[in-house]
Image (cartoon, coloured by chain):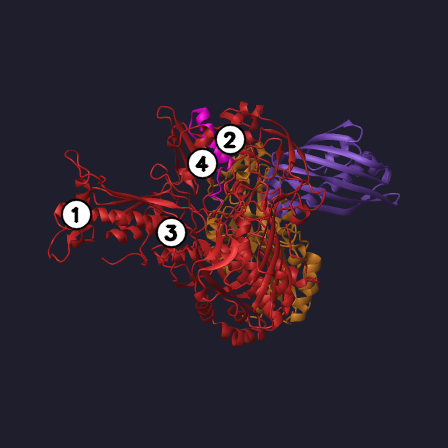
Amino acid sequence: MILSGTFTFRGPRALVWQLLQDPEVLVKVMPGAQRLSRIADGRYQGVMKVGLGPVTAAEFALDVTLGDLAPPERFTMVIDSKGTLGFARGTANVALDEEGPDRTAMHYTSELQIGGRIASVGQRVVESAAKAMTARGLQALQQAIDDRLAPSAGSTSS
Amino acid sequence: MTASVGKRVPRNEDARLLTGRALFVDDVQLPGMLHAAFLRSDHAHGRLRAVDASTARGRPGVVAVFTADDLGDYWRPAPLLVPPPPVPGMVFNQCTQVPLARDKVRHVGEPIAMVVAENRYVAEDALADIVVDVDPLDAVVDLERALALGAARVHEHLDSNVAARVHQQRGDYAAARAAADVVITRRFWYDRGASAAIENRVVAATWDPRAEQLTIWDTTQAPIPIRNGLARMLGLAESQVQVIAPFVGGGFGPKIMMFYPEELLVPWAARRLGCAVKWTEDRHENFVATTQERGQLHDAEIAVTRDGRILGVRDVFLHDTGAYDPYGLTVPINSQCTLLGVYKVPAYDSTFTAVFTTKPIVTPVRGAGRQHGVFVMERLLDLAARELGLDRVEIRRRNLIPPDAFPYDQGIIFQDFTSLTYDSGDYAPALERAAELIGYEQFVREEQPRLRAEGKHVGLGIVNYVEGTGIGPYEGARVTVEPSGLVRVATGVGTQGQGHFTAFAQIVADVLAVEVAAVRVVTGDTREFHWGTGTFASRGAVVAGTACRAAAVAVRQKILDAGARRLNVAADTLELSNGRVFVTGRAGDPGVPYGELAVHANPLRGAVTAGVEPGLEATAYFGPDRGSTANGVHAMIVEVDRDTLLVRIARYVVVHDCGRLVNPTIVEGQIQGGVAHGIGNAFYEQLVFDEQGQLLTASLMDYLLPVATDVPDVEIVHRETPAPGNPAGLKGVGEAGCIATGAAFAQAIEDAFGGAVEIREIPLSPNRLFELLHAAAPPAPEVS
Amino acid sequence: MKPAPFEYFRPSTLDEALATMAAHAGEAKALAGGQSLVPAMNFRIAQPSVLVDLNGIPGLDGIESATGGLRIGALTRHRTLERSAEVREAAPLVADTMPLVAHVPIRTRGTLGGSLAHADPAAELPAVMLALDADIEVCSQSGQRTIPAGEFFTGLYATALAPDELITAVTIPRRNSAAWAVDEVARRHGDFALAGVASVVRLEITGAVAGARIALFGVHERAVLADAAAKAIVGQVPTAEAIEAAADTAASQDADPASDVHASSAFRRHLTRVLVRRVLTRAVARARGAE
């Protein structure tokens, strides 16, 4: 499955880059992420519980390796997640474009292989689900940026 | 008494089936029975590094968890079921499936571990406890890429993914091509699908340590070979093992695949644990755990003269055999042979390469590769007809094998290891009758142009096929008259809904002059009869039916002889009617009932005549030295909605010839069911594997089976060209309904679009038609 | 395909049900008809640790005329809606849609509330509620609120329901001078639609379109109103050309279909155009009294 798109953040590129590397931020924005810790430079492990409609608490062990780091412009992610409902593996390329002092366009392309039970009975919605979860995560990241930029103004929880 | 063979006798078994009194394997309940579940690979290809079942073993309710290491010497690749036919120059690499994966997994669904627990719920809970460490390898999915240099190898002891290569030829194709006026060359893709029997596979086993008997209930089409193989593998005598296939809800081929991992492990576990064990396959598992038939990619060519006569055909094809090849080359050999069809093909050159892929194993499914051959030939003829400006029925007429040419030796080797010889057939009248019944002339000349002018897309397809049926090696039957007068028949084949309990009863009833309902048939139980092979290749009625007949004939003679002794007359003055023996011509004589003779033939005291066997019983075997060739014509009219591309089948006609009919209702059921199967394969069913070998359609939500509103009533005409090879002139018909449907569909839809699109693949769907119609250039057929 | 273990509650009153939902918020799933939930549980795709069976609660089903329109209890079975003379009279779009929903045996168990709460993107009833501008009544332990259909369906299998809320009723406004039509394309009768359209149209006396609610299903992550298409046709006389333009707009702007093994997104857009054309044509003909 190919998942690609562009999302424009309200915020400076340096901040977007910084938050994307911070596991404590990522665990809040990745949908269903329960735990994410840095176990080595550029390597994170954690647990994700995916909930979407009838799919409840599909738990996945997550392993993410960052590479080709060219801060603050681009990096790649190798994702390896697996659980009893199947696995998702792939690579994502992320590029950040500075469109303005407070506008950052994130271009992402990823190729994911989905396997196991979710692939064999969920094909009808796997693509939409991945898009929906990506959108949720990006909106949550925007919220995290907003919180960082104006914490004293009383950030609203999402 | 009037004969029952040829009559529409209501089925003996239906009352039990319809009132829930038939035993299916999942109905088997035994005291203390445990339930098995299998952990199956999520990956199509990978190195299996470790399997940790410790947590699973500790779960309450779990009795045992077995992995490959726990099987000891019992772990070994399963036997090769069908050796490859003796074609000169053949390459064959045998790689059969293992009970549980070790070191490597080779398809999604391959079993890795077996859990045995108090119930299936707990067993499935325990599956989630097992931790499997797999290093993924590149999947092998596309057939051409599988053969390319550098492709991942499914079996690493081989230097490629070639499972087999077979070349057969007759005549001189190069000369034919040079002499031809027109040569049509095309690439075709035929994808099949699962068999989707309404009953999934079930295995239950129990070991009685006091009787030292292992009893296995199995939804198999071949109980006797299962018994023999399992006895050998488990170190038991054949007589210590009983295999029972009670009522089975549809077989269609995958249930004759033998020594599935579950078949090997459930009995082994029952002995090991000292408890009855049952495994019931669920529908989701069925898509990856039970065999299926997969794709073939054909590069085919036909050389014809200007007036449409075939000079030769050349075909080079790739056959997807899946991760292992236990069933040898039956499917591709059938494709190779059936392509010749009802036609005279002076020169034929056919080569196939069977390819290992990281997908479930391929073994015969209803049609068993024949439809691929029919599709290629019928499509080539259609395309040649279009090129030559010839009518598509006329080009077929001009190439039919004439009725005086039988037995007709095609000069190549068939799946039964003998040369492909058609025993009998009369093809031209079948084609004419089908054309007449579907209204071909009227449709082409008047109806279609009129509807086209109204903007409707209607099309007609008419195609021929042959079906090699009734092959050996042999079957047997035992017929017994019981003291009650009831006649009991036992035979080794199994029954999966094709009405053996009635058809065999009819055959025996006619010979013995009793009512059909007075004949009780037992099939598929090694306790009752233990010599034979099984139900496959449309051979049950022909081979087992003929054996039943021979045994009945022997019993008939015993009845006459017993009657002669009893009445003190010569046997040739006697006749049989309604279960009694009479002296011919003696009016008002009540006669002697068979039951009484049976009692007298089994005395408790006194002397018996030397050379006479007790009772009224005989066993006989029938082993044809070659099969009998059935044939038929399918014709259909479709209407395609030009906006939604949904297809409605307006009419479906089958003119078929399966020799003498035992029971027309049963035959029609086979054909109607086969057509439904064929329609499913042509337009609804598709097993979609992604590039990583993941099956994306593993539920009936996504694997679409046609429902009753999608299948028309098939108009059936029977023709009877008797088979010379068996006394009753029978030919098989189990697969007839689905062999030609894909070819008929393709022709009809192509016709509906008036040539705007060329159909070179099956299955089709509204979505695929949309792609084909809107492509700038005709796209290559989709190959998965 | 056996479900994972779960705790089972069968409350006998709505209050009990709401209390249980609140106590296990996030872990509990409500069981109404179970026609979507139970298969998901059997596949172990869904593993709720708590199941709250609503089928024993009296008063949650029923069809009655209310001031706002037709009030349908959430636990009303599809088959009841299908055979109801009141629904046929007051909400004929619903009556016409019911035969498209799955199969008769499923319709004897499936419920209106269940279908809306599940919000399958290819389901008919969410789209029909959008087309009818229905109001969805929702309860929790903390109280009751009404959510218009246009705000109820928020994303893929996502609704505005909080984890402790239950749908209790749906009210369909009575509209005069409104004409309707519904159509879908499915591979087999009863399958999930590859694409579907449900529409309610009102004409002015001049013949121009006064209002059009065109709801799409199967071509977006949720049931969605084809706003751009509606805008294109409101104020116009609905000639064949105007309808075609609206259909084109719906297909290119309002639909956002994904691809799956049954249909590519291009084919789904094509079907959207075909169905919007067919549905608007039938609705307009009905409005003009031709049907």
What residue is shown with label 3?
B541
Chain C's colour is orange
The Cα atoms of the two marked residues, 3 and 4, are separated by 26 Å
Q: Which chain is purple?
A: A
* In the image, residue B198 above or below residue B407: above
Residue at 34% over, 55% down = B727
Identify the amino acid type marked 4: Val
What residue is shown with label 2?
B123
Q: Residues within 10 Å of mark 3 (few under 14, many from 20)?
A: many
Q: Which residues are magenta?
A: B254-279
The Cα atoms of the two marked residues, 2 and 4, are separated by 16 Å
Query: Share a chain, discs 1 and 2?
Result: yes
Measured from the top left, where is residue B331 in percent x and y? Answer: 53, 49
Asked which quadrant contains residue B585, the reply is bottom left
Q: Which chain is red?
A: B
SS under mark 4: strand
- Residue B22 appears anywhere in the view: yes
Identify the amino acid type marked 3: Ala
What residue is shown with label 4?
B203
What residue is shown with label 1?
B563
- Residue C7 appears anywhere in the view: no
Identify the amino acid type marked 1: Gly
The Cα atoms of the two marked residues, 4 and 1, are separated by 46 Å
